[in-house]
Each structure stands twice: as structure tokens, then as C-alpha cells.
Amino acid sequence: MGSIVIAERTIQYRAVAGPAGRGQRVLYVHGTGCNSEVWMPHMQAIADAHAPVAIDLPGHGGSPGRGFRGIADYAYFVVELARTLGWDRFVMVGHSMGGAIALLTALHHPELLDGLVLVDTGARLRVSPTLLRGSREAASAALTPGADRSSEIHGFLVGHLDTERATFGRAFDLPLLALVEDSDLQRSLLGHGLPPEPDGG
């Protein structure tokens, strides 16, 4: 686990040693209520060919303080982490809110990205009214709904990733892996949980 200071905030991240100078740099971004640990199995699976890093967003995991209400605030920290690591270009992988962060990064910093992998996300993230009601009730009772959902999200990634498609790809009628140009990374992703696109897809 590494840490850096960005805008006077300590940001934790996980890195799995990959090959020096080979493969793609891959930056993983978790969703709300999770942390970088959810990405460890996938990071370990591709580390012999690529250089994976996963951030703990502010207010999540080992990055202390409060989280943010806006996606742009999180995107700033993700971009600054990549810059601090010396990455001029990388593939960004985002789940849920992390996918929204990845989309915003692609809109405002396309020069940094070699590709996107989006998992269970979209440009507009709808939240269950039941979840919102529960959060409001917890806030009004001065409780923090701080349940660690890492194992739940990990289970989703392991058990359901093979049936998911990237929302970005669907919206633009692009195959998921068309967003990742590097053929070696495509093979790695296909071999570790992402489904091949249907013929003609």
C-alpha cells in the first residue's frame, strides 16, 4: 500500500508489481462505499503483463477524511495520482461511481487515456429510493452508514462480471474492448473475467 499527498489530503493506493516498461498502465477506481481492495484479484491476475494500481478515493478505505458530493472532485484526485506516478497515458477501469469518474476523466482529459473499462456504471447513476431513504434516516439519526461493502462488490465482480457490458460501449454501439486498443491487454482482460464480444458486435 502506498500513499501520496494531493491537495493536502493523504491518498492511499495499492500497486501490484508489474513488468518494468512493458504492458499497459492500468488505474482502477472503485465505487461508493468500497475501496481499492475490491480490485486486487484482477490486478494480481494481470500484473505479470501490465502495471495495475488502484486508488482509495478520498473518504474511502485508507484515504482519510470525508468523501465528496461531486464526481469532478474525485476525478481530480485520480488524475493527480496518475500524474504523481509519472503516468502520461493509462487505461482506466471504473466500477459504478468509479465508472462515472472514468467517463468524466475521458471527457476532460482524453489525452491521458489509452482506454476505458466500465463496469456496472453509466453517465447517469440512479440510486434506489430505498437506499436514499435509509441514508437520510441514518443521517437524521446522526449515524453514519459506514458498512464496508468490499466483499459484496468483490462477489459481484467475480460472479457477474462475465455478464456485464460497458455502458459506454452500449451507448455508442461499441464493443467493450474496442475502448482498449492494446491487444495484449484485451487478451488479459478476456482471460480474467471479461466476456468476448459477440460476432459482429
Image (tube, rainbow, N blue to C red):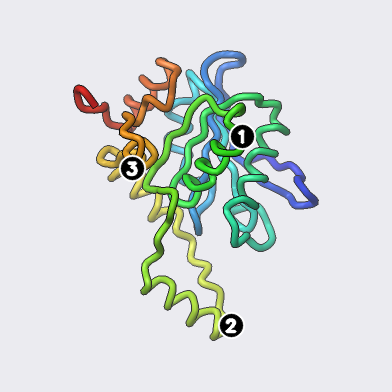
Residue assigned mark 1: 109
Residue 59 place in picture, x, y as percent = 63, 58
Residue receiving disc 2: 142
Give x and y (percent) for residue 132. 44, 72
Compare residues 39 and 129 and report the one nearer the observer.
129
Find disc 3 in the rendering and name its residue: 158
For residue 2, side relative to residue 35 (left or right): right
The Cα–Cα distance between marks 1 and 2, rounded to whole angstroms, is 38 Å
Q: Nearer the viewer, mark 3 or mark 2?
A: 2
Q: Which amino acid is tagged 3? A: Val
Specify few, some or many for label 3: CA neighbours under 10 Å numbering under 14, 14-19, or 20 or more.
some
Is residue 164 depicted above or below 51 in this figure?
Answer: below
Q: Which corner quadrant of the image does residue 127 belong to? A: bottom left
Q: Which of disc 2 and disc 1 is earlier in sequence?
A: 1
Q: 196 above or below 64?
A: above
Tell me which amino acid carries mark 2: Ala
- x, y percent for residue 197: 26, 27
Judge the density around disc 1: few (<14), some (14-19), many (≥20) Cα neighbours within 10 Å: few
Quarter holding the C terminus is top left
Picture residue at 70% right of the left edge, 39% below the top: 80
Task: Using the image, determine if residue 40 lies above or below residue 24.
Answer: below
Whichever of callouts 3 and 1 sits on the residue coming sooner in the sequence is: 1
Q: What element carries label 3?
A: helix
Q: Which residue is drawn at 66% across and 63% down?
A: 66
Q: Going by the picture, which residue comes out furthest to the left? A: 199
Q: Earlier in the sequence, mark 3 or mark 2?
A: 2
Amino acid tagged 1: His
Q: Which of 10 and 106 is in front in this view?
A: 106
Q: Are marks 1 and 2 in contact (CB under 8 Å)?
A: no
For the residues labelled 3 and 1, say whether their Cβ atoms are less than 8 Å apart. Answer: no
| Secondary element at image label 2 | loop
Q: Residue at x 55, y 38 (%)?
A: 107
